[in-house]
């Protein structure tokens, strides 16, 4: 009995063509699914320590409560009166800044509405706390 050697098993090579196809399909998907619009950023400045000893405060504290009410330096005011109150403060001190402190449950859209009101009132310095 004569045994013939088994034919050697050829290793199959893995083709790169299917892998390249998948990569291009993923690239195409992410290019079509992504948004290429420019987002408008709200300019914010980091808080700084001021050593000036003037009698007036250097910035106002604007708190946004959970129910949406506003509190400017401890005084409650309606949202419609925010711009007028800020203009009155700016008449006294033109370089006055505003520090915004939202409650944890305030949503981003509500915060941005307040930022828009502050920008429309001409607040030169705006800080988020």
Image: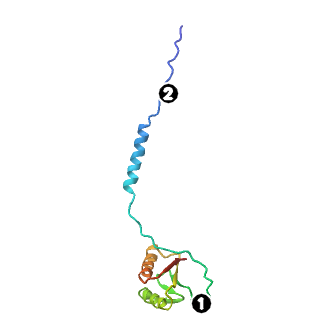
Q: Secondary structure at mark 1?
A: loop
* Residue where numbered disc 2 is placed: 11
In the drawing, does residue 28 fall left or right of residue 129? left
Q: Quadrant of the N terminus?
A: top right
- Tell me where residue 109 appears, x and y as whole percent: 43, 74
83 over 9 or under it: above or below: below
Query: With 120 as the anchor, is 102 left or right in this view?
Result: right
Residue ID at (38%, 60%): 36
Does residue 66 sit above or below 9 in this rendering? below
Measured as percent of width and height from the top left, residue 65 is found at 50, 82
Q: Dot 2: within a 10 Å radius of its alpha carbon, few (fewer than 14), some, or many (20 or more) residues?
A: few
Residue 54 badge: 1
Residue 25 visible in this rendered orientation of the protein: yes
- Give the camera-side residue of 10 and 89: 89
> Which residue is most to the top?
1
Query: Quick one: 3 or 102, which is closer to the camera?
Result: 102
- Quadrant location, the C terminus: bottom right
């Amino acid at each position: 009995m004569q045994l013939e050697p088994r034919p050697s098993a050829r290793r199959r090579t893995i083709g790169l063509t299917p892998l390249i196809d998948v990569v291009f399909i993923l690239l195409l998907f992410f290019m079509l699914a992504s948004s290429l619009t420019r987002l408008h950023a709200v300019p914010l400045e980091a808080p700084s320590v001021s050593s000036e000893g003037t009698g007036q405060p250097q910035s106002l504290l604007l708190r946004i409560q959970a129910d949406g009410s506003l509190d400017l330096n401890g005084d409650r005011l309606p949202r419609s009166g925010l711009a007028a109150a800020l203009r009155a403060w700016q008449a006294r001190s033109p370089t006055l800044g505003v520090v915004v402190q939202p409650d944890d449950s305030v949503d981003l859209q509500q915060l941005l509405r307040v930022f828009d009101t502050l920008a429309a009132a001409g607040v030169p310095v705006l800080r988020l706390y």
